[in-house]
Each structure stands twice: as C-alpha cells, then as structure tokens.
Amino acid sequence: MASVETVRVLTVTEAARELRCSKAHVHHLIAGTVPGVAPLPSLWLGRRRLILRTSFEEWLRGSEQNHGKLL
C-alpha cells in the first residue's frame, strides 16, 4: 500500500485545468453522463470530490484508445 505522502490526488478544478474544460464538464465525466466516454473514477473526501492521479492517467489513456470507436 502506498504511503499517504506518495498518493497524488487531483481536485475537480485541477482535473478541469488539465483537460482544458469546465468543472461542470468534469462533474459530468464523473457521473458518466458524457456519451461515448467511460466515467471518470473519483472518490469522496467529506464533501470534496477527488481523483487519484493514477486513475486519471489510466482513464485518459483508455479514452485515447477508444477515440473513434463506437460503443
């Protein structure tokens, strides 16, 4: 198990900045309501929604690989 110091997380704002989209769009990605895109994995920490960096990168690679394919 990784120590707390090595676990990297993104806030919704940080994920939106990296994806160059709005925070609302990131929330839609998390909810799985964007057609043709797998839901973005996330977790709750109190009222905050966080995304593990490793999950974000895996999701992004998966989204790149599925680009152009019909679901």
Image (spheres, rainbow, N blue to C red):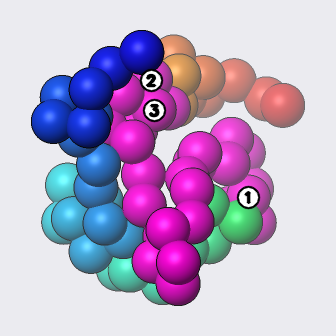
Question: In the rendered image, which quarter contains the C terminus?
Answer: top right
Q: At label 3, which amino acid type do we have? A: Ser
Q: Nearer the viewer, residue 67 or 62?
A: 62
Task: Residue at 38% x, 80% y: name it.
Answer: 23
Q: Position of residue 44 (x, y in %)?
A: 57, 66
Residue receiving disc 3: 55
**Residue 35 figure quarter:** bottom right
Question: In the rendered image, which quarter contains the N terminus?
Answer: top left
Residue receiving disc 2: 58
* Residue 20 visible at all: no
Residue receiving disc 1: 32
Q: Callout 1: helix, strand or loop? A: loop
Circles 3 and 2: CB atoms closer than 8 Å = yes
Which is more N-terminal, label 1 or label 2? 1
Which is more N-terminal, label 3 or label 1? 1
Left of 21 or right of it: where is 18?
left
Q: Position of residue 6 (x, y in %)?
A: 18, 28
